[in-house]
């Protein structure tokens, strides 16, 4: 039996790594590939055993003609048969142990995924304070467990619905036969409820100013570009054109949630979370496609997507949007503090996800990131605090500055998963240098329900009629 603990990558500094070439799943997959080779050898040994049994049957007759020589030949054949049988049995034990370890890992992963859903839950009817046993801000793992067990909690936290109303919606959701773990389905349910202003609407893109920049193409440098977008007066994504090893490549930087009236003109307000979690960022992805074209990207251009918080949801959703993938060659996705555990990318797209142990936001979709060859999740574990006098916002763990600083430790990590992931990123965009950055302005189309009614035509005064 292979000890799964021996396959767990060691924690390096404050970084805890999951997935990639150093992940347990990939290591077991590699071992299973080797097991197939062992199976072929075992099959050959079985065939050899069969032939030896036949040869021994032929040798028995010689014991009557030449007893000494014949007996020696039979004994030699029997010893050879015993050796081959021992080797075959040993290889079968190794093969069985590796398969058992793989099955144990898959089973434990499944149990970990469903445990939040089948575990005990508290009543939903009296309001959030009675059934969310958490201090604020909760940790990522606590939020992941809560969101997986009772996804309506996410709706309450993000959308501010009262407990009884959310409970009724949950009851309708369950009555329709939908899974409790379907956070995205519940977000759609709330967005489409009567009177909701959270339904996604089309988003338009228009090219703004561009400038020549000196780009640091490391994860820390790309997250710094995302941090600089936070000060923009209106919603923008930044499209950076670089000369990669295979020709021009484009980096799309997508900011996090912006303050403002949910459902207004800013596509990165709270309603943008609904678009990302509930609808696959369909409207935002269309605008990003337009923005890439505005910045000069041609069909088939290599693209790297970078997003913080809500922006990471949109960035990862690019990896499962067929229209986007038909037009552009998405190679790599980098997210920080984003709930993207439920989004799976095709094997051809690599992704790197930064999360902090104290950040509840990455856990708000109730799903941990998959342990896959093309997906690496880096968890920052160093304790962080909000500086005295500053607004804690969603908690110190969600700070983009902390994520940027944590990303700065990645190039020095000896972990093979991190090394390969950074190598893939560098293979697309290089190490940086002179680049062209275009600010693409995004705006959500007006909500007809919010438009003021047309002015009522004034009727002439009765006293003026007939004059």
Image (cartoon, helix red, strand yellow):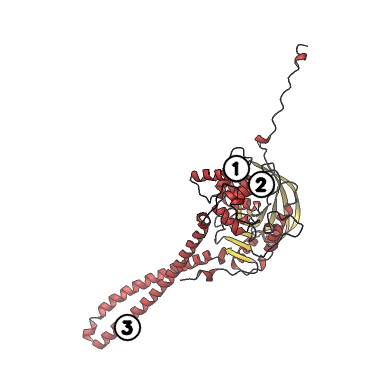
Q: Quadrant of the C terminus?
A: top right
Disc 2 to disc 3, C-alpha distance: 80 Å
User: Within 10 Å of the Cα at label 2, are there few (<14), some (14-19), or many (20+) other Cα atoms?
Assistant: many
Query: Answer yes or no: do the residues labelled 3 and 1 have beta carbons within 8 Å?
Result: no
- SS at badge 1: helix
Q: Nearer the viewer, mark 2 or mark 3?
A: 2
Q: In which quarter of the image is the N terminus?
A: bottom left
Per the image, the residue denoted by label 2 is 270
Query: Answer yes or no: do the residues labelled 2 and 3 have beta carbons within 8 Å?
Result: no
On the question of residue 72 being in view, the answer is yes
| Mark sitting earlier along the chain (2/3) | 3
Residue 199: horizontal and vertical position, in percent? Answer: 61, 41
Disc 3 to disc 1, C-alpha distance: 79 Å
On the question of residue 299 being in view, the answer is no
Residue 219: horizontal and vertical position, in percent? Answer: 67, 60
- SS at badge 2: helix
* Of the pair 262 and 205, the residue shown nearer to us: 262
- SS at badge 3: helix
Residue 303: horizontal and vertical position, in percent? Answer: 63, 54
Disc 2 to disc 1, C-alpha distance: 12 Å
**Above or below, 170 relative to 220:** above
In the current view of this chain or complex, which residue is farthest to the top? 466
**Residue 442 appears left or right of 193:** right
Per the image, the residue denoted by label 3 is 76
Residue 5: horizontal and vertical position, in percent? Answer: 53, 70
Per the image, the residue denoted by label 1 is 191
* Of the pair 53 and 199, the residue shown nearer to us: 199
| Mark sitting earlier along the chain (2/1) | 1
**Residue 459 appears left or right of 79:** right
Q: Residue at x 59, y 58 (%)?
A: 142
């Amino acid at each position: 039996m292979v000890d799964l603990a021996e396959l767990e990558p060691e924690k390096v500094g404050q970084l805890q790594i999951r997935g990639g070439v150093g992940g347990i799943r990939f290591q077991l997959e590699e071992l299973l590939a080797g097991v197939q080779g062992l199976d072929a050898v075992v099959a050959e040994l079985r065939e050899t055993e069969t032939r030896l049994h036949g040869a021994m049957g032929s040798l028995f007759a010689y014991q009557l003609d030449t007893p000494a020589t014949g007996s020696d030949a039979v004994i030699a054949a029997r010893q050879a048969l015993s050796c081959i049988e021992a080797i075959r049995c040993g290889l079968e034990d190794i093969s069985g142990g590796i398969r058992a370890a793989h099955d144990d890992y898959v089973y434990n992963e499944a149990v970990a995924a469903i445990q939040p859903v089948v575990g005990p839950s508290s009543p939903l009817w009296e309001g959030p304070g009675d059934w969310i046993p958490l201090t604020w801000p909760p940790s990522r793992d606590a939020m992941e467990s809560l969101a997986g067990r009772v996804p309506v909690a996410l709706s309450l936290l993000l959308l501010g619905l009262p407990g009884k109303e959310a409970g009724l919606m949950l009851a309708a959701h369950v009555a329709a036969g939908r899974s409790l773990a379907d956070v995205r389905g519940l977000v759609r349910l709330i967005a489409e409820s009567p009177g909701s202003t959270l339904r996604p609407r089309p988003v338009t893109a228009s090219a703004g100013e561009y400038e020549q920049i000196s780009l640091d193409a490391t994860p820390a440098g790309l997250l710094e570009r995302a941090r600089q977008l936070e000060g923009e007066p209106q919603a923008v994504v930044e499209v950076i054109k670089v000369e990669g090893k295979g020709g021009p490549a484009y980096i799309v930087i997508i900011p996090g949630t912006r303050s403002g009236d949910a459902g207004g003109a800013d596509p990165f307000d709270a309603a943008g979370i609904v678009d990302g979690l509930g609808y696959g960022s369909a409207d935002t992805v269309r605008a990003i496609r337009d923005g890439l074209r505005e910045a000069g990207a041609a069909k088939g251009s290599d693209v790297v997507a970078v997003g913080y918080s809500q922006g990471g949801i949109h960035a990862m959703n690019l990896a499962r949007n067929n229209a986007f993938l038909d037009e552009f060659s998405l190679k790599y996705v980098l997210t920080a503090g984003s709930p993207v555990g439920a989004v799976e990318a095709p094997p051809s797209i690599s992704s790197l996800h930064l999360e902090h142990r104290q950040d509840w936001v990455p856990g708000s979709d109730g799903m941990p990131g998959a342990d896959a060859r093309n997906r690496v999740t880096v968890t920052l574990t160093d304790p962080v605090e909000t500086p005295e006098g500053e607004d804690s916002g969603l908690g110190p763990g969600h700070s983009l500055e902390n994520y940027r600083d944590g990303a700065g430790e990645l190039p020095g990590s000896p972990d093979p998963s991190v090394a390969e992931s950074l190598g893939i990123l560098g293979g697309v965009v290089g190490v940086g240098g002179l680049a062209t950055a275009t600010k693409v302005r995004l705006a959500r189309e007006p909500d007809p329900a919010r438009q003021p009614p047309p002015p009522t035509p004034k009727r002439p005064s009765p006293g003026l009629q007939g004059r």
